[in-house]
Every structure is written in structure tokens, then in C-alpha cells.
Amino acid sequence: MSPTSVTSSESAVTVSGLTRAYGPRVVIDRLDLRIGRGEFVALLGESGCGKTTLLRALAGLDPIQGGHIDAPGRPAVVFQEHRLLPWDTLWQNVSLGLPGADPRKRAAAALVEVGLGDRLDDWPRNLSGGQAQRVALARALVQEPRLLLLDEPFAALDALTRIRMHVLVKELVARHQPGVLLVTHDVDEAIALADRILVMRNGVIASEHRADTHGGPAASRDQLLRELGVATNLQVA
Amino acid sequence: MDGRVSNVDYVIQQEYRAPTTPAPTRHTSAIAKPGVKPNLIVLSWITPVVLIVVWEALAQAGWLSPQVLPAPSKVLRTAWKLTLSGSLLNDLGVSLLRAAAGFAIGGSIGFILGTLVGFSRIAEALIDRSVQMIRAIPFLALVPLVIVWFGVGEGQKIFLVSLGVAFPIYINTTLGIRQIDPKLVELGRVQGLSTLQLIRRIILPGALPSILTGVRYSLATAWLALVVAETVGAQSGLGFLAMDAREFLRTDVIVLTIVIYALIGVAADSIARLLERKLLAWHPNYGKGARS
């Protein structure tokens, strides 16, 4: 694995003291986080630990009850479902909400980047799951976001397609240099993609693992699984 | 599209709506083998053709009194004569104009109210109950009242058509807007769309299949309303033609107007279907090359 990105001093997002609660139940508790431009951060955690809540707060989709989110520009989001508009062609989908001149040309360039440059005028219904998710990725990146939020975007894909998507995402992030926050359940995915892996528990970041300077993995699989409460020695017994 | 529906009474609404998964009959059934289809179409035309031939034969043989039911050939000849004299086209034009005016007025009212109620719970609270109460009246029961209000002039006809058109469009617009996937609306927000852009790019296109279903149903109601309005009293139009013919026992003219009413109903439906194919090209159940 080669070092694909360097943590720059420029910040993609800085979160301080973020608190999010549903009524009396505190889901995120005074959380601090900084992601630099070009940095790929994976957020692991059990279901209900607050990781998706954190992503939604960063995306500006939910109100927060305390703290600050300092993110220059609007973050782009890729959701678990592709969320393509079925009534728009692929280039129209990619250029949704894209300000500035010549949206078709820019959407076309983004679609070329994800390998769908020949499908500009096709409908989403003619796409496979992996292709649709690639269009969603193009739609996020065409906005040149400083911060890219990925909410388990590969979870619904088959294993082979998922690996292809990993390669593609890594490439695109290296080229466009957004700060990335990837929310995932998949420990292997986090290891394969991230410069930094955060494990979230009870609304706070419980531990943090950084890739070494040679771009080696940020943490071992066993270690992460242990932190997530999975007993890996069962296989041995 | 899934079945998320508001507290608007869904069961009653079903009457105006196409089956939830539109599987229009114009598409070949997935089960039918390709080679069988043309034969079935030919077969399906045999019965009506035989019926008309038998009708013609009975009339020619004198077993059917021309005053009860004139021969099809006689009706055709009458159509030709009335066309030449210009009176048929004139009356047809008057009727179509009334239908169009009523459709435009009723359709706009239904669409605007439906949009308001679809978007806003407050608008729903203010508007929906009243609309549903008025809708509970079979609108043809209003005919005597409408005649008192408008006489038997154009106002009465256009009012009745508007009334018949407004409800199906209202209900399907509301439902179409409510059925929009909230995840797509959320996406619109993430992509930074303004409210106006959100409506134009996501909400209206998403509601369009439902709205067009409303249009198709309302075309049928519009036509029915017009027939009734014109039959009750008119100085021109197809209904007038029929009622005038009744006075002189011109059964051929009466049958002719009935046939024309039917043909226009079919034409209106075809236009609505064509609209669906054009506007819903993206939809797996409508567009060209639809695989159903």
C-alpha cells in the first residue's frame, strides 16, 4: 500500500465540544475532532454508538445542542443508498445543485473519473448498484468539497464491487484532496482506506489509530475488533 | 414509490387512482409468448365486428325499427351529411371548448389546492376537510342548484366540468407530493438546493406520475359532466344536437352523438397516455422500451 495522502495543516473540518441529544438522551457528548484536507478518517463503532449521528450533524442535516462545527464550504455526502433522482439523466443527477457555468461539461468530466463517461444521458434505472454508487460519488466530488462525508456507502454492494469501489475512492480522494470522514461497520474497509481510524463508543471517541509514516495500516484487525467488543480468539479455540 | 401516506383518507382516494404499481394493459404481458400477441389482437376485434355486422343485418332485414336503433350505415350517412352541412363540427367545437375551459379552471384549482395541502400541514388542516366534504356530494346532484345559479348557459356547463375535474387532480397532487421519498428531499438539502429548486427538481417530478393519473381520471369525469350539463339544457353542442334530434325522433343523430362522445373519450385517454409516455420516459412502467 502506498502513501496516498498527506495530512495537510489546512483543516477540512474542526469540531469542538459537539453535543447532540434526542430529548434527555445524549448521543454525542462534547466531541472534539479535526480532519485535515486530504486526510482520510474512518469512524468505526457499534450500531447506535452515534457515528451516523455525528456524520449527519457535520452534513448540517440535524441541529446540534452544543459546541461548534467549523467547516469551510458545504460538505458533500455519499449515503448508503445512491439517492439518484430517477427522473433525471446521469449528468443531470451529477450536476444537481452545482453552481457555475457549463454544468453538463463538468458533470461529464466527473462521470469520466468514475468510469461512466459514456453514460451521460442514461437513466439511473439502467445502472447496477455499484454503478449507481459511482454516480453518487461523482455527484459529491464534482462540487470540489473540502469535506467529503461517506455514510457506509459500500455496505450494500457485493464483496468484489466493494473492493473496486475502495480502489476508486482512494484514487479520487488522492486527486481531489478533500478531508474524508468514512462511517463504516467494516473493520477491513477502515484499515484499507483510512489514514486515521477512530473508534466511537457512547458518544465519544474512545480510541484513535494513525497510519505510520510509511503508509502502513493504522491498526491491526484484531486490535480494532477487540475494541469493538468482538472476541476474535473464538476462531482459535 | 412506497406506501407512506398521510392521514388523508387513503381508502376513499383509491377510487380515483390507478393500481399502485401502474401495469397498464397496453403493455404486453410478461407471460405472453411473442408470437401469440398479434393473433390475440385480431381475435379481440372479432366480437365487436360481428356485433356490428349482426346489427346492420337486423336493421336491413327490417327486424329492428329504425326509430329504436338505426342501422350503423345509416348513422354513418347521417354523420357525413351533418359534417357537410357544418353543423356537426360546429357543435363538436362548442362542446370541446366547454370541456377545455372547465378542465383548465378545475384542473388549476385542484392542482393549486393539492400542492398547498401536499406541502403544508396547516394548509391541510384549513382546506382538506372542506374539500373532502364537498367531494362526498355526487357532483351531478348539484345540477339543479347549478341551474338556479347560472341558468343553462355556458357558466353552468363550465362550472360542472370544473367541479368534476378538480377533485381527482387535487387528490392525486396531494398524494404525489406526500409520497416523495424524504431521502431525496434530504439529498436536495445536502446538495444545497433552494426551496424553489427543491420543488422544481425533486418534488414536482416525483409527484408527476400521480398527478398524471389524476389528469387521466379527471378527463373522464370532465366528459361525463359535460354530457350531463349539455343534456339538461343547451342551445349548441353535442348534447343539444342529441336533445334536438330526440324531438324529431331522429334516432340516427342520437346514436351518432353517443358514438362521438365515446370516440372523444377514447381520444382524450390516448392523449393522456401519450403525455405519460413523454413526461415519464424515466419511469420503468411508462417510458419507451419499458420493460414490464
Image (cartoon, rainbow, N blue to C red):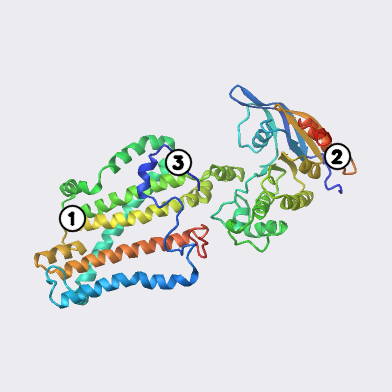
Helix, strand or loop status at disc 3: loop
Q: Is residue A17 above or below residue A174?
A: above
Helix, strand or loop status at disc 2: loop
Q: Is residue B262 above or below residue A148?
A: below
- In the rendering, which numbered label is found on residue B103? none
Would you name the residue on which mark 3 appears?
Answer: B5
Q: Amino acid at mark 1?
A: Gly
Dot 1 and dot 3 within a common chain: yes
Q: Which mark lies nearer to you, 3 or 2?
A: 3
**Closer to the camera in the image, A99 or B28:** B28
Q: Quadrant of residue A197?
A: top right
Dot 3 and dot 2 within a common chain: no
Looking at the rendered structure, the number of numbered marks drawn on it comes to 3
**Closer to the camera in the image, B39 or B221:** B39
**Closer to the camera in the image, A70 or B26:** B26
| Left or right of residue A31, residue B241 in this image | left
Q: Position of residue A26 (x, y in %)?
A: 65, 24
Q: How far apart are the two marked residues, 1 and 3, measured between alpha carbons?
A: 41 Å
Q: Position of residue B122 (x, y in %)?
A: 41, 34
